[in-house]
Image: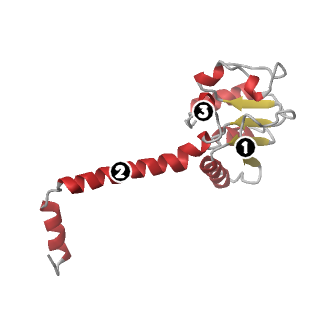
Amino acid sequence: MEHDDPAEALTELRERRPGALELLQAAAGSGLAAYAVWALLLQPGFRRVPLRLQVPYVGASARQVEHVLSLLRGRPGKTVDLGSGDGRIVLAAYRCGLCPAVGYELNPWLVGLARLHAWRAGCAGSVCYRREDLWKVSLRDCHNVSVFLAPSVVGLGSAPLGWGHTLGVQPW
């Protein structure tokens, strides 16, 4: 099966039907690729968080970002986004004049993505993204806090964050 003409070899490959072993290899390769994406991008955020507090990454829509900004309008002081993901709320808050703007995210890949977005927007030196557990972040000097909570976490209220009654909560 030695061909001198690449076009002839390509034609032969196109006409050949894959066998059971080749289909099995393709399925196994696809499964391995899906697992690699999950292990590298999604799982790091789950490693140190109890099962009932795990929240998968879902990027905020433009409408959600605008709603957060409408709640923060007219409120000076440090703005923090807990579980900042790709950093779009932190960037938007900074662009609206809320300084300093800080994002906390446990997943190192998302922190890197957020920093890339900030660099591309020309705001890399002005916003800050930290890889820290949002359940352990001190909010003593924060005036504005944004956090999206999963239904499994909402029932716990603000107790896991140690907020107590000191912060005004505006659900939406």
- Label 1, secondary structure: give it: loop
- Label 2, secondary structure: give it: helix
Q: Nearer the viewer, residue 141 or 20?
A: 20
Residue topped by disc 2: 30
Circle 2 Cα neighbour tier, 10 Å, few/some/many (<14 / 14–19 / ≥20): few
- Mark linked to residue 54: 3
21 is higher (above) or lower (below) than 4: above
**Image position of 37 (left or right of 21):** right
Q: Earlier in the sequence, mark 3 or mark 1?
A: 3
Spatial CA distance of label 2 from label 3 is 26 Å
For the residue marked with disc 3, what is the amino acid?
Gln
Q: Quadrant of the C terminus?
A: top right
For the residue marked with disc 1, what is the amino acid?
Glu
Residue in view at x 19 percent, y 68 percent:
10
Q: Nearer the viewer, residue 112 or 61?
A: 112
**Image position of 159 (left or right of 2):** right
The reply to whether the C-beta atoms of the residues labelled 1 and 2 are less than 8 Å apart is no
- Label 3, secondary structure: give it: loop
Q: Let me know if residue 116 appears in the view.
A: yes
**Render colour scheme:** secondary structure
Circle 3 Cα neighbour tier, 10 Å, few/some/many (<14 / 14–19 / ≥20): some
Q: Let me know if residue 73 appears in the view.
A: no
Rendering coords of residue 19 (x, y %): 17, 55
- Mark linked to residue 132: 1
